[in-house]
Image (cartoon, rainbow, N blue to C red):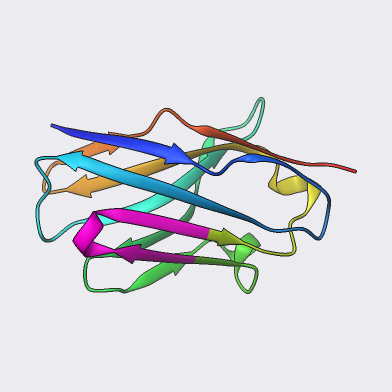
Amino acid sequence: QVQLVESGGGLVQPGGSLRLSCAASGTIFSINIMGWYRQAPGKERDLVAVITSGGSTVYADSVKGRFTISRDNARNTVFLQMDSLKPEDTAVYYCNEHQGAFAYWGQGTQVTVSS
């Protein structure tokens, strides 16, 4: 079992920045994928960015060049640096950890981009 705790969401003006963090605890495999997904009201949950334990990354086209995902394997923590935020980035952001046949989700953190 894996527990994921997110932090760092909030309200920011367009063009601003936020940094999300997600700390994983429990039984964590050395080889896994951690990442961020988001869900806006009335929409499906979509991938934002993921990173493997080896450091390979994948980003949604909508965030490329603005968001940066990173991780600290020693602390089982994944980060999402979000710059040049837009109102359309407003959503609940969920941390995800995928290892083997199992996937785990955090409780979500709200990000609101508004003036």
Rendered location of residue 33, percent (x, y): 26, 57
**Quadrant of the image containing the C terminus:** top right
Rendered location of residue 89, percent (x, y): 69, 48
Give left or right: position of 111 versus 101.
right
Task: Name the residue located 32 percent from the left edge and 45 percent from the top edge.
Answer: 23
Numbered-mark total: 0
Task: Name the residue located 37 percent from the left edge and 33 percent from the top edge.
Answer: 106
Task: Name the residue located 30 percent from the left edge and 64 percent from the top edge.
Answer: 72
Q: Nearer the viewer, residue 109 or 59?
A: 109
Q: Is residue 95 magenta?
A: no
**Quadrant of the image containing the N terminus:** top left
Rendered location of residue 83, percent (x, y): 68, 64
Residue numbers of the magenta segment: 69-80
- 86 in relation to 1, above or below: below
Give left or right: position of 94 versus 19.
left
Give left or right: position of 31 versus 91.
left
- 11 in relation to 35, above or below: above
